[in-house]
Image (tube, helix red, strand yellow):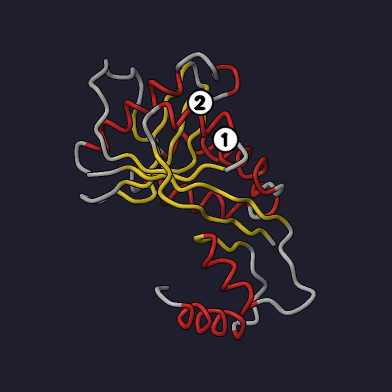
Amino acid sequence: ALSDRAIQAFAGLARRQNSKPHLLMGEHNAVESFWSYYAQSPESPRLVCPILFLQRHKPFDEQPEVCGLRPATREDLEHVVHAQAAMVLEISGVDPLKKHPAGFRERYLRRIDKKRVWVVIENDRLVFKADIIADTPHVSYIEGVYVTPEERGKGLGRRCFTGLSRLLMARSKALYLFVETQNARTKSFYFKLGFTVAGQYDLLYF
């Protein structure tokens, strides 16, 4: 939405759907404006999660290829859905494998079939995962970056992420991703990789 009037119109349309919202995501000021038009007292979100929108336009320096980095296959489904469910639970407090297991798996199968999920699996154990939500000549948008807890802090996540990023930036001009504002460790990881802040967003969970 490019104007407050458009946000107000969208809020009115959403309210008339008579459906209970699950998630609201958007630029900080736009979300505040939308909610002011949409909410009916005493409605309030269950959880508000501020996030930073990060960007990188400069290609990564050449490094050795990451052994085992590949698009996920259907045989990898349980590995990736359990990793993603753990991430969702940590952020939102809701386990999608308990709330909507069939739908959650179906969405991930669609991503896998489109080769939008990349993994490194060693000895039948997922050690790295990332989802490519958008992949165009102008931008690639990454989310769901996961490193198994046993391998964190050893440089594996950096090697895998930069390896995937080099592949993406061979055909895109920029990388974008979101990170929780309060997650100091993850923010530091991306800042050290040369990402900068492109905007401030909010996630509202209901």
Label 2: how many Cα within 10 Å (few below 14, some 14–19, many 20+): some
In x, y percent, where is residue 27? 50, 60
Above or below, 106 against 33 in this view is: above
In x, y percent, where is residue 152? 55, 20
State the residue lying farthest toward the right: 42
Q: Residue at x 59, y 82 (%)?
A: 17
Q: Which mark is residue 99?
A: none
Image quarter of residue 36: bottom right
Q: Residue at x 54, y 32 (%)?
A: 186
Above or below, 101 against 3 in this view is: above
> Total of numbered circles in the picture?
2
Above or below, 98 against 149 in this view is: below
- Please identify the quadrant where the C terminus is shown: bottom right
Side of 53 where 95 appears, left or right: right
The residue wearing badge 2 is 126
Type of amino acid under label 1? Ala
Could you say which is closer to the camera, residue 107 or residue 143? Answer: 143
Type of amino acid under label 2? Leu
Q: Secondary structure at mark 1?
A: helix
Image quarter of residue 163: top left
Q: Secondary structure at mark 2?
A: strand
The residue wearing badge 1 is 83
Could you say which is closer to the camera, residue 77 or residue 185? Answer: 185
Side of 168 where 35 appears, left or right: right
In x, y percent, where is residue 199? 45, 52
Q: Residue at x 39, y 28 (%)?
A: 193
Q: Residue at x 75, y 72 (%)?
A: 43
| Label 1–label 2 contact, CB within 8 A | yes
